[in-house]
Image: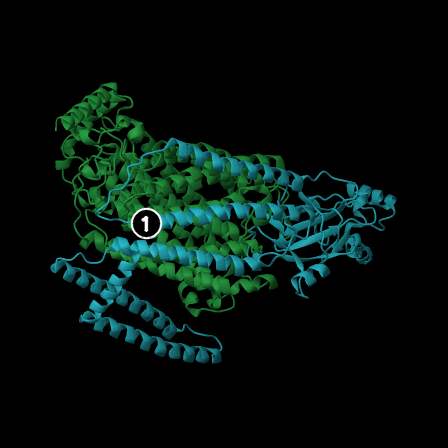
Chain colours: A green, B cyan
């Protein structure tokens, strides 16, 4: 490893020349190959998509709260999608579909990994840029293309795809089955292929950079947990996204070229279709083989970011660093063999269901370890409530609340009655929706100074946090109980069932809580945009953190470090070390400079160092005695 | 500590009243109140006005009212922000330390914990009591036991971890006088909290695995009552076996006109199959629901019986269960004379997915026999003529017809 690192140094010197060559607006802001600019592009695109998806959710929440009321304004805004001020039932399903797709893929995969893997991997492992800056740029442009294609489906005659974000065929394969399965679905599939291309290019880059471009001294066990999380996320993505493409391509064949991979024995509206021999379950297997790792692709970066932010702001090392890494690895491996828990009641062999139940509940163990370790990190800390810290804490709270309901749903016997009800909606919105978004926001608040050289306003951050945190609980907590009453998800209205009408008041409550949370995002957006231009100037290391990104200048050079790349001497979590002058010791501070705070543990693989430490302690002791 | 902070807070309010910006703040509040009053009046007036009109136009005044309300909210947040800034600056000038935000946040965390726990308790008692009544099937009772066990275990963990989280936040909030405790790891405690969840989950897995195996154990038995449920956009078709107790074969290619399920009448068992509007089930008999879909995936969801199984085109599925409580009994139990068991679709299937239901009625065996005797066969006279079947009893004529068709 060390030889590689030394080699990197050589390359680094060579690259310094780049700083002086002139960037045009186009190469600096648009077709940038600088990982920090690409990260910002991902972030701003991600935030834009998140706002759009959030507005879509408000639209369908209004429908659920006031199913009998007409809102003429909606007709003005949406035209034929809301005739006479009431959402069209198929457009409602399209809203749900596109909300889910955007949030899962465009915000929480690309917006989260794309932003923070790009920003932090080179900065925290000590590299000048990504392994392949050009592919990195392509990754962003494919992502943007995917976003535009996805949104363009709102402007076509029949509207966007409407079969749910899981696009199960035959519903998604038969244009006669619903409007959303026409051109809208085709656009969805094209967009998704572009998205996966983007995701793969990003993922390969992340893995390569982490493996090959770490600076001198940065061995794997000195990497911050963020990098571990991004690294494992990228591996997950690289291995699972191609399977989704396979599934999607077969679906394109079924839709457009008359094959029968997923279709058989179908009669739509009295018309006998020629498909024979396919199986809709096959698609579900292919989809969830990505789909389940996908939820960990979404949550693991949030976990990594939260770990880092919580450690910095508790002024304490993350508790059980090794356990944290091993549990991430455990989650990564296990997440490939649990996909069947989405399919307990689809007609899959019940024995297989039993097996998937076992693997699913096993994955709760590493998740539990992570939670306890976070709690132990807070214990006896010296907690600074920066907005980033609050969001990281919110992430932990949501992860607990949502994770526990996963134990119900992972149990095949209980899933029989809970499958596809609001219990599921509550579960995944807490554990992967809210938790991952909070992880992302924690990252935005924490690394904003690194991205833009300015600070975000703390007070507005507090306001944003509490309104969003409380709002999210108010929205999703009551949904559990609707699910326990057998209220299904993806219902346009609950007016047709006498037994569900009593939930109307709860639905109104949820809608207003959602509107409140949506309004709270204005505080964030204002804070974000305002601070980019007029925020308080940041110092080099505003949070007194140890990791390498805070050793770079505030000005953000292309190449990151003006001189040589830093050398790493210690792990990133030496906070509040007894005997140290300050409550943090940067990774680039050699152990020889901190003799008073060194512990025998710091020299585990270094007998010479241990020897030096012993001599030093002995002389100290001798001096004490002399005194 | 907290107490001191509250006193500080009180002092803070007092200082506010002596400062000019407070008047602004009050003015804004007053404005807000006036606008809310006025706005409500306007909105009310508007709704009555629109009620008269045949086709309501956009209620721009109402929209404007909400926009204005939001704008005022934003302005008041901005004003409060400015006040805070002015206050902190003035404190700075006096050489004091301003608001201790870490303390404020610590206290809010504690308040949130208490309010959250009260809220969660309220939801459990009020909304929890709105959940489904007791299971009306044999296996459902086992699922409910499983559910109860899981709920108890998870709620214990939920309460403990959330309390620890927020209490730690309050207890260990920042202080300049203190340093955090350097604790990178502790292998013993890490092993403990890996092994304990592992054991608890093993128990749940074993319990769940056997419950699941029992529920799904659906080897066909002789006395099962076979009923076909077929989903299509957007309704359910129900087919009972006739006196012979066997359901005839189906083939989707035969779907045409009156033969909407594609029943194969070459199969003799098909001849006496019955159609029904309601899914009527005899109590305490094993029911085997054979589940089909014609167009897209649907899901047979009967939550009161803890029954759910997807209906997949091209992949016949089934679910075996035994209802134990009749509709009459259940009506008494839930004190609702109109209560009905329902079967509804629980897999997104198109525009009218939200209204794809069928009434399920559980009756005594005597009532069931009476009811089934009255049901009409699928082979209606119209279908007979369509299929050119002179009479179902005369096999000969069928063969003739087939011959004719072959010619």
Q: Quadrant of residue A192?
A: top left
Q: Is residue A374 left or right of residue A92?
A: left
| Above or below, comparing residue A116 to residue A421 in the picture | above
Residue where numbered disc 1 is placed: B171
In the image shown, does A117 or A186 lie closer to the viewer?
A117
Position of residue B319 in the picture relative to residue A137 (left or right): right
| SS type, badge 1 | helix
Residue B46 shows in the view: yes
Q: Position of residue A14 (x, y in %)?
A: 16, 28
Q: Is residue B90 left or right of residue A51?
A: left
Residue B396: x and y, percent? 87, 43
Quadrant of the frame with the C terminus of chain A: top left
Residue at the spot 47% in from the left edge and 75% down from the top edge: B55
Quarter of the picture holding the N terminus of chain A: top left
Judging from the image, mark 1 belongs to the subunit labelled B
Say if B260 sits above or below A377 in the image.
below
How far from the left and from the top, in percent, is residue B267? 79, 42
Give me the residue at 41% from left, 67% from top: A76
Of the pair B109 and A336, the residue shown nearer to us: B109
Tag count in the figure?
1
Disc 1 crowd, CA 10 A, few/some/many (<14, 14-19, 20+): some
Where A100 falls versus A338 (above or below)?
below
Which residue is found at the position 21% from the left and 24% from the top?
A: A613
Is residue A261 shown to the viewer in this render?
A: no
Residue B310, position as x, y percentages in the image:
61, 46
A190 vs A551, left or right, is right
Frontmost residue, B328 versus A256: B328
């Amino acid at each position: 490893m060390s030889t590689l690192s030394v080699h990197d140094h050589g390359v680094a010197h060579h690259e310094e020349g780049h700083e002086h060559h002139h960037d045009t607006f186009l190469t600096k802001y648009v077709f940038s190959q600088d990982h920090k600019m690409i990260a910002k592009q991902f972030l701003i695109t991600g935030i834009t998509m998140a706002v759009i998806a959030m507005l879509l959710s408000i639209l369908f929440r209004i429908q659920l709260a006031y199913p009998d009321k007409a809102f003429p304004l909606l007709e003005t805004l949406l035209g034929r999608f809301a005739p006479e001020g009431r959402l069209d039932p198929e457009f409602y399903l399209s809203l749900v579909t596109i909300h889910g797709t955007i949030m899962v893929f465009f915000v929480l995969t690309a917006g989260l990994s794309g932003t923070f893997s790009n920003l932090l991997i080179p900065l925290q492992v000590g590299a000048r840029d990504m392994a392949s800056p050009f592919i990195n740029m392509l990754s962003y442009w494919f992502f943007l293309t995917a976003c535009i294609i996805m949104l363009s489906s709102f402007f076509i005659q029949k509207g966007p795809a409407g079969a749910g974000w899981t696009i199960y065929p035959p519903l998604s394969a038969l244009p006669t089955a619903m409007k959303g399965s026409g051109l809208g679905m085709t656009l969805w599939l094209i967009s998704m292929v572009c998205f996966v291309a983007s995701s793969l290019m990003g993922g390969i880059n992340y893995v390569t950079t982490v493996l090959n471009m770490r600076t001198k001294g940065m061995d794997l066990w000195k990497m911050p947990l963020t990098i571990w999380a991004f690294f494992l996320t990228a591996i997950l993505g690289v291995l699972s996204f191609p399977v989704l493409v396979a599934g999607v391509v077969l679906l394109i064949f079924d839709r457009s070229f008359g094959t029968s991979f997923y279709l058989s024995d179908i009669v739509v509206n009295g018309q006998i279709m020629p498909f024979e021999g396919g199986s809709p379950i096959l698609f579900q297997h292919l989809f969830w083989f990505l789909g389940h790792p996908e939820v960990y692709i979404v949550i693991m970066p949030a976990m990594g970011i939260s770990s880092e932010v919580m450690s910095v702001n508790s002024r304490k090392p993350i508790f059980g660093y090794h356990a944290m890494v091993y549990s991430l690895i455990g989650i990564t491996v296990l997440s490939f063999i649990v996909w069947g828990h989405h399919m307990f009641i689809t007609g899959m062999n019940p024995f297989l269901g039993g097996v998937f139940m076992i693997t699913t509940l096993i994955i709760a163990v590493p998740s539990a370890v992570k939670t306890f370790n976070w709690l132990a990190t807070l214990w006896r800390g010296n907690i600074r409530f920066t907005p980033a810290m609050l969001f990281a804490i919110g992430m932990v709270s949501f992860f607990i609340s949502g994770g526990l309901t996963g134990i119900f749903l992972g149990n095949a016997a209980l899933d029989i009655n809970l499958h596809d009800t609001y219990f599921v909606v509550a579960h995944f919105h807490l554990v992967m929706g809210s938790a991952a978004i909070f992880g992302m926001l924690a990252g935005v608040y924490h690394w904003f100074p690194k991205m833009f050289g300015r600070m975000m306003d703390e007070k507005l951050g507090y306001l944003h946090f509490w309104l969003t945190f409380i709002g999210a609980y108010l929205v999703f907590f009551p949904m559990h109980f609707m699910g326990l009453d057998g209220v299904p998800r993806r219902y346009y209205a609950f007016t047709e069932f006498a037994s569900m009408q009593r939930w109307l008041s709860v639905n109104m409550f949820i809608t207003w809580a959602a509107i409140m949370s949506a309004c709270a995002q204005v505080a964030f957006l204002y804070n974000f945009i305002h601070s980019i231009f007029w925020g308080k100037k940041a110092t080099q290391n505003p949070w007194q953190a140890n990791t390498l990104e805070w050793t770079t200048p505030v000005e953000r050079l292309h190449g990151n470090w003006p001189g040589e790349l830093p050398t790493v001497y210690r792990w990133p979590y030496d906070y509040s070390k007894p005997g140290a002058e300050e409550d943090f010791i940067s990774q680039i501070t050699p152990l020889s400079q901190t003799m008073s705070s060194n512990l025998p543990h710091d020299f585990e693989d270094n007998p010479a160092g241990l020897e030096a430490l012993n001599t030093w302690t002995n002389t100290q002791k001798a001096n004490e005695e002399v005194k | 500590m907290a107490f001191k902070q509250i006193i500080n807070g009180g002092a803070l309010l007092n200082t506010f009243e002596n400062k000019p910006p407070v008047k602004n703040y009050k003015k804004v509040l007053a404005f807000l109140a006036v606008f809310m009053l006025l706005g409500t009046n306007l909105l009310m007036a508007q709704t009555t006005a629109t009620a008269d009109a045949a086709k309501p136009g956009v209620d721009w005044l109402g929209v404007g009212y909400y926009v204005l309300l939001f704008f005022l909210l934003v302005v008041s947040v901005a004003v409060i922000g400015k006040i805070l800034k002015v206050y902190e600056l003035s404190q700075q000038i006096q050489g004091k330390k301003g608001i201790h935000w870490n303390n404020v946040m610590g206290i809010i965390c504690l308040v949130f914990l208490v309010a959250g726990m009260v809220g969660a308790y309220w939801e459990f008692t009020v909304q929890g009591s709105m959940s489904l009544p007791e299971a009306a099937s044999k296996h459902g009772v086992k699922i409910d036991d499983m559910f109860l066990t899981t709920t108890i275990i998870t709620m214990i963990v939920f309460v403990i971890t959330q309390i620890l989280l927020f209490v730690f936040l309050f207890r260990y909030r920042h202080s300049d006088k203190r340093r955090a405790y350097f604790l990178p790891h502790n292998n013993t405690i890490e092993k403990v909290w890996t092994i304990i969840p592992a054991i608890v989950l093993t128990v749940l897995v074993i319990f769940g695995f056997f419950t699941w195996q029992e529920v799904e154990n659906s080897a066909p038995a002789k006395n099962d009552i076979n009923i076909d449920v077929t989903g299509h956009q957007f309704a359910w078709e129900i087919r009972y076996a006739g006196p012979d107790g066997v359901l005839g074969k189906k083939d989707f290619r035969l779907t045409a006109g009156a033969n909407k399920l594609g029943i194969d009448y070459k199969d003799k068992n098909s001849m006496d199959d019955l159609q029904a509007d309601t899914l009527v089930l005899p109590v305490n008999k094993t029911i085997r629901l054979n589940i089909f879909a014609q167009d897209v995936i649907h899901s047979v969801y009967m939550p009161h019986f803890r029954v759910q199984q997807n209906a997949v085109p091209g992949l016949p599925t089934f679910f075996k269960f035994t209802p134990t409580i009749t509709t009459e009994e259940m009506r008494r139990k839930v004190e609702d004379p109109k209560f009905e068991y329902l079967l509804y679709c629980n897999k997104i299937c198109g525009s009218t997915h939200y209204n794809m239901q069928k009434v399920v009625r559980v009756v005594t065996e005597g009532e069931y026999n009476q009811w089934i005797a009255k049901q009409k066969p699928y082979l209606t006279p119209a279908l007979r003529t369509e299929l050119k079947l002179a009479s179902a009893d005369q096999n000969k004529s069928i063969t003739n017809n087939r011959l004719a068709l072959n010619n």
